[in-house]
């Protein structure tokens, strides 16, 4: 069987890929997708440890993460639409009113 | 090499490839499609971890509902590709890459030091681990309050999304 470390390493690579996207990409929608990648990496870690410890609570945590991610996607995309409507752009470098 | 190991490497490779494509693809539509593929491969990884219920939820909620929402927004806004050259080496990109590589090195090192051995399974575990029945029992007894709180959160998210996205109510 596959050792649990392999799953954790996969989750680490996935999380770092998502984090790199969040830091580097300028399109707000793509940044959101990268956040979803990071949430999935966290889920994978929960499930890997649940498998190692033979404990179902990791699955319950993953379930809650999925539910919260659904709520986050709904609200986030609504904000994206509202910002696009008022600014006409999704480039997060150009959306900087809150900075001043 | 057993089938499980073979499947793991196939799914892991595809997942990482898909994730890389999400970060690297230029148009938002290509990103979304790569993300759907990544979610499917991840569901395969979840099945290898005996998390059948979560794997089904992953396909239904993530690859289904959430990604359809993303695609709707992409088509609604009819985004054109940004004119920025992909290879522009700005300060923030270099810092982002350095921070990511640092975190990755830290994670890989610390994961290498975790315990390897699994808790041995009893016959009861073999039959009930990760099934909808077991998860439902836990959710509706021990975790009833968080479960109801999440339903409230989803309700607030629905109302909030309508309020934020609508020009005027």
Image (cartoon, coloured by chain):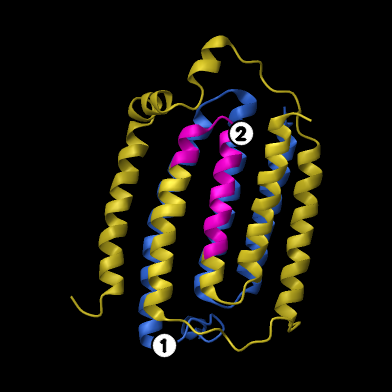
Q: Colour of chain A?
A: blue
Q: Quadrant of residue B89?
A: bottom right
Question: In terms of depth relative to the viewer, which is nearer, B81 or A99?
Answer: B81
Question: Is B38 located above or below residue B143 in the figure?
Answer: below
Residue B18 appears in view: yes
**Magenta stretch secondary structure, dominant:** helix
Say if labels 2 and 1 share a chain. no
* Looking at the image, residue B85 lies above or below residue B12: below
In the rendered view, does B76 fall on the left or right side of B36?
Answer: left
Secondary structure beneath dot 2 equals helix
Figure label count: 2
Residue B15 or residue A33, whichever sits in front: B15
Which x, y percent locates residue A46? 58, 38
Whole-angstrom CA distance, mark 2 to mark 1, is 45 Å
Closer to viewer: mark 2 or mark 1: 2
Q: Name the secondary structure under disc 1.
A: helix
Where B67 sits versus B3, above or below? Answer: below
**Residue picked out by circle 2:** B48
Question: Which residue is rendered at x = 41% and y = 49% of the image?
Answer: B61
- Residue B45 lies in the magenta stretch: yes
Q: Residue at x 61, y 65 (%)?
A: B22
Residue projecting furthest to the top: B123
Disc 2 is attached to a residue of which chain? Answer: B
List x then y, in percent, for residue A5.
Answer: 74, 36
How far across and how far down the image is residue B96, in percent?
A: 71, 70
Asked if residue A90 is among those painted magenta in the image, a careful observer would answer no
Write the start and end of the magenta stretch as one range.
B33-56
Q: Please say whether residue A65 is visible from this viewpoint.
A: no
Q: What residue sits right under mark 1 in the picture?
A: A87
Q: Quadrant of the C terminus of chain B?
A: bottom left
Image height of B87 relative to B1, above or below: below
> Chain coloured yellow: which letter?
B
């Amino acid at each position: 069987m596959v050792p649990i470390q392999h799953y954790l390493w996969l989750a680490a690579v996935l999380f770092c890929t998502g984090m790199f996207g969040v830091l580097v990409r300028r399109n707000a929608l793509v940044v959101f997708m990268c956040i979803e990648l990071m949430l999935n990496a966290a889920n994978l870690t929960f499930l890997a440890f649940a498998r190692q410890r033979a404990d179902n609570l990791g699955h319950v945590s993953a379930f809650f993460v999925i539910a919260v991610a659904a709520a986050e996607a709904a609200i986030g995309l609504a904000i994206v639409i509202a910002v696009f409507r008022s600014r006409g752009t999704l480039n997060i470098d150009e959306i900087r009113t809150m900075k001043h | 090499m057993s089938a499980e190991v073979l499947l793991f490497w196939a799914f892991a490779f595809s997942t990482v490839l898909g994730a890389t494509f999400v970060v690297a693809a230029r148009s938002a539509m290509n990103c979304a499609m790569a993300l759907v593929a990544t979610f499917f491969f991840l569901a395969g990884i979840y099945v290898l971890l005996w998390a059948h219920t979560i794997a089904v939820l992953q396909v239904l909620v993530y690859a289904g509902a959430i990604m359809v929402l993303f695609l709707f927004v992409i088509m609604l806004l009819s985004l054109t590709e940004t004119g920025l050259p992909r290879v522009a080496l700005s300060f923030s990109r270099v810092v982002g890459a350095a921070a990511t590589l640092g975190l990755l090195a830290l994670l890989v090192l610390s994961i290498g030091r975790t315990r390897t051995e699994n808790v041995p399974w009893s016959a009861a575990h073999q039959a009930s681990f990760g099934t909808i029945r077991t998860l439902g029992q836990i959710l509706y007894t021990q975790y009833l309050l968080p479960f109801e709180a999440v339903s409230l959160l989803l309700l607030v998210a629905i109302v909030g999304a309508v309020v934020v996205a609508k020009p005027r109510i």
